Image (cartoon, grey):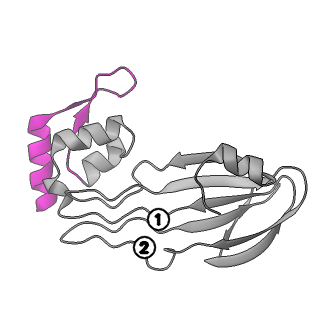
Amino acid sequence: MYRGSVEVDESKYPILVKQLKVIPGGGGAGRMRGAPGSEVIYGPRKDPMMIVVSCDGQVHPPQGVRGGQAGPAAATYKIKADGSQEKLPGVVECRLEPGEWIRGVDAGGGGYGNPLERDPKRVLRDVIERWETSARANDIYGVVLTGSVGDDTLAIDEAATLARRKALAG
């Protein structure tokens, strides 16, 4: 299903979109990070429905180049009425009963270049805008952050960032 507008899709089809979001940290790390993946959860409004899912990128996720990391792989899950999840194959036809959902995780793009070369100010902005996570800023990009997004005090610790990047570079 093409996802242009949740409202339009819900008005055209007997589905309910429970969630549609960007996945923070869902792209391959790099000097230029890959686009983040997204997650959608949808299911029938009130009657059973048959769906066909063709989900590419589960076996071979988007690769990074010139030192960039691969983006995370895509995945599709059936969420059963009891809340348990079953991973589905890349191409599948299945029946959804009311109270069951499909959770689709779209692959993020691969990164370009060494993540340790990404401008720390861009990493800070990525975390503030929720394209990246604080943990990935530290663990992959080598950017040490202080403060928090919630109270608008998130900042770069420049000395700790230089030391962290040196340690990660080995």
Residue underneath mark 2: 61
Q: Are marks 2 and 1 in contact (CB under 8 Å)?
A: yes
Where's residue 71, x and y in %? 38, 65
Location of the C terminus by quadrant is bottom left
At a point 19% along the width and 69% down the height, the residue shown is: 67
Instruction: Return the mark for residue 44.
Output: none
Indicate the quadrant where residue 90 lies: bottom right
Query: Magenta segment: does it hold 66?
Result: no
At a point 17% along the width and 43% down the height, the residue shown is: 120
Q: Residues within 10 Å of mark 1 (few under 14, many from 20)?
A: many
Residue underneath mark 1: 107
Q: Amino acid at mark 1?
A: Ala
| Secondary element at image label 2 | loop
What range is drawn magenta here? 141-170
At a point 75% along the width and 76% down the height, the residue shown is: 93
Pointer 2 or 1: first along the chain:
2
Taking the image as shown, residue 169 lies to the left or right of residue 3, namely left
Mark 2–mark 1 distance (CA, rounded to whole Å): 7 Å
Location of the N terminus by quadrant is bottom right
Taking the image as shown, residue 120 lies to the left or right of residue 94, namely left
Query: Magenta segment: does it hold 153?
Result: yes
Seen in the picture, residue 43 relative to 147 is either above or below; the reply is: below
